[in-house]
Image (cartoon, rainbow, N blue to C red):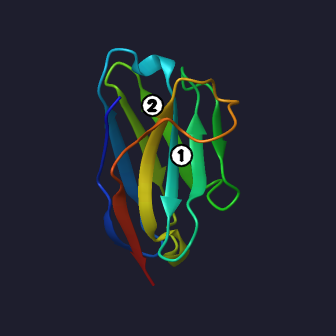
Amino acid sequence: VQLVESWGGLVQAGGSLRLSCAASGRTFSTYTMGWLRQAPGKEREFVARISFSGAITLYADSVKGRFTMSRDNAKNTVYLQMNSLKPEDTAAYYCAATSRDWKFLGDYDYWGQGTQVTVSS
């Protein structure tokens, strides 16, 4: 599986961005997808996860109520709608995939190259 993120950028605090992640392959609907982020000097952290069908989504407490993850299996794409952005959301955002179900433990199997999100105060 190859993953390509897009639509990161620079936004003012309180603004919105919508990230996209396009996946290759014919079995996209059999992958649990995730968004993770890493800020300079910090550990990579979980942001959101979505199940095969999109019926189940999980969010980090820090983004709950502000971010929404969704997927379109017909387009092999997942999205991360980010609203009410804060300077502390500044990070490189990575899309990731695994063939395990949404309850999996451990790391993802496939990763995108990342897209930078910068939130100015």
Q: Please name the amino acid that badge 2 sits on.
A: Arg
Q: Residue at x 36, y 54 (%)?
A: 114
- Give the total of numbered labels: 2
Q: Position of residue 81 (x, y in %)?
A: 45, 49
Query: Does residue 92 appear to the left or right of 4 in the view shown?
Result: right
Q: Residues within 10 Å of mark 2 (few under 14, many from 20)?
A: many
CB atoms of marks 2 and 1 within 8 Å:
no
The residue tagged with tag 1: helix, strand or loop? strand
Q: Which mark is residue 68?
A: 1
Q: Residue at x 52, y 41 (%)?
A: 34
Q: Residue at x 43, y 51 (%)?
A: 94
* Image vertical order of residue 78 relative to residue 53, above or below: below
Query: Does residue 38 appear to the left or right of 43 in the view shown?
Result: left
The C terminus, quarter of image: bottom left
Of residues 104 and 69, which is closer to you in this image? 104
The N terminus, quarter of image: top left
Q: Residue at x 31, y 34 (%)?
A: 2
Q: Position of residue 110 (x, y in %)?
A: 43, 37
Q: CA distance from mark 2 to mark 1?
A: 10 Å
* Image vertical order of residue 59 relative to residue 27, above or below: below
Q: Which mark is residue 2?
A: none
The residue tagged with tag 2: helix, strand or loop? strand
Of residues 9 and 14, which is closer to you in this image? 9
* Image vertical order of residue 18 relative to residue 53, above or below: below
Q: Please name the amino acid that badge 1 sits on.
A: Thr
Outermost residue, top side: 26
Q: Position of residue 75 (x, y in %)?
A: 31, 24
Q: Quadrant of residue 29?
A: top left
Q: Position of residue 85 (x, y in %)?
A: 49, 67
Q: Residues within 10 Å of mark 1 (few under 14, many from 20)?
A: some
Q: Quadrant of residue 3?
A: top left
Q: Which mark is residue 71?
A: 2
